């Protein structure tokens, strides 16, 4: 394995892991440790506007990539429809749910809850895919992972009351389920598509969806905080464009199995950055729940992890996975 590929892997984990921090900053969070504060009296993004502009900047970045790479776009209606489905369930909906949820919960918790995507993916695959069933070992991993999820969400549970924290946590869990649905759909319906074209088309449909929904949901008032704009530009160009390009570069160099090890990295990065830079609180339940989720994912994907540690064969193509 080349040192460059490991560098790309770590950079990808850092970009995706820190996306949760920048989502928080774009909606009013500050980084006092770094001296990055919103000017007094300035305004920041609401969740709909943030996602719309994030996708717009990501799309502009992909336009630049396409200007340098000649690509053939699909014309078959069912393929275009599949991209529209992915634009909704792999990007627009989960981006919005995570962003909306983070108005109510910490970024560190959101990153861990989003890390449950592999658990939901294997549950859905059991009913949707013919060659990816839940075995006894995987069932044990699912139980461990979901116990961790219950600990994470249950720490804010109040009998007979639906608190803001619980609603925010459930929104991020719903985003993880949406990503899992999209992953299984992509596996069945978008195999063999160009990664660059797939990324562009998904971002395009997602931004069209959000551009249509945003005027109905929020006032069309542009934020005045430079820090909020920096956060959204970062999320678009790096979190939604560069991250996918790094991901596809790793797919070609390592193959899909080893590349998906990044799902073990970004929740930890999101957890650490939220605690250190946003001064978010942490208690034993956050660490215990997070540890159980990670262990559950390791058990569920034990065979894949073993394959990932073996010498990799280059992969010609593979389908995309989500990014925050």
Image (cartoon, rainbow, N blue to C red):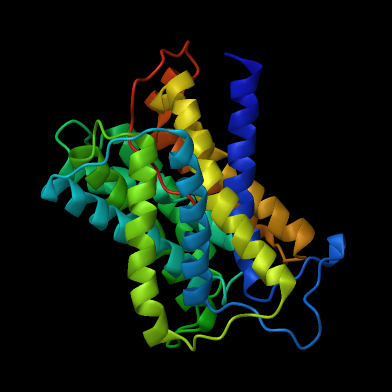
Compared across the picture, whether 42 is left or right of 319 comes to right
Q: How many marks?
A: 0
Q: Give the percent coordinates (x, y) of residue 59.
A: 46, 54
Closer-to-camera residue (4/20): 4
Q: Which residue is drawn at the image coordinates 34% and 76% (left, top)?
A: 212
Which quadrant holds residue 90?
bottom left
Closer-to-camera residue (25/170): 25
Q: Is residue 157 above or below residue 51?
A: below
Q: Which residue is drawn at the image coordinates 33% and 50% (left, top)?
A: 201
Q: Which residue is drawn at the image coordinates 41% and 79% (left, top)?
A: 214
Quadrant in the picture for the N terminus: top right
Q: Is residue 212 above or below residue 122?
A: below
Q: Give the percent coordinates (x, y) of residue 66.
A: 43, 40
Q: Give the percent coordinates (x, y) of residue 63.
A: 46, 48
Closer-to-camera residue (36/262): 36
Which quadrant holds residue 31?
bottom right
Which quadrant holds residue 4?
top right
């Amino acid at each position: 394995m080349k040192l460059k590929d490991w560098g790309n892997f770590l950079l990808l984990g850092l970009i995706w892991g820190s996306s949760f921090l920048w989502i928080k900053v774009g909606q009013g969070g500050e980084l006092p440790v770094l001296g990055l504060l919103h000017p007094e009296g300035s305004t920041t993004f609401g969740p709909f506007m943030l996602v719309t502009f994030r996708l717009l900047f990501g799309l502009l970045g992909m336009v630049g990539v396409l200007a340098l790479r000649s690509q053939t776009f699909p014309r078959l209606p069912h393929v275009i429809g599949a991209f529209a489905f992915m634009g909704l369930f792999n990007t627009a909906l989960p981006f919005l749910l995570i962003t909306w949820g983070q108005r109510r919960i910490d970024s560190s918790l959101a990153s861990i809850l989003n890390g449950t995507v592999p658990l939901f993916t294997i549950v859905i695959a059991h009913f949707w895919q013919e060659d990816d069933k839940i075995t006894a070992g995987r069932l044990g991993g699912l139980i461990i992972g979901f116990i961790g999820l219950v600990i994470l969400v249950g720490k804010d549970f109040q009998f007979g009351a639906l608190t803001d924290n619980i609603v925010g946590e459930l929104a991020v869990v719903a985003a993880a389920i949406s990503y899992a649905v999209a992953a299984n759909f992509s596996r069945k319906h978008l195999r063999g598509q160009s990664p660059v074209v797939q990324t562009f088309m998904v971002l395009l449909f997602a931004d069209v969806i959000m551009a249509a929904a945003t005027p109905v949901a929020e006032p069309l008032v542009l934020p005045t905080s430079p820090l909020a704009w920096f956060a959204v530009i970062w999320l678009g160009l790096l979190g939604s464009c560069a991250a996918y390009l790094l991901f596809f570069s790793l797919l070609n160099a390592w193959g899909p199995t080893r590349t998906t090890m990044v799902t073990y990295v970004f929740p930890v990065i999101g957890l650490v950055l939220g605690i250190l830079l946003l001064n978010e609180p942490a208690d034993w339940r956050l660490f215990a729940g997070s540890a159980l989720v990670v262990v559950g994912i390791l058990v569920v994907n034990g065979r894949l992890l073993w394959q990932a540690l073996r010498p990799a064969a280059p992969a010609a193509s593979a389908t995309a996975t989500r990014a925050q």
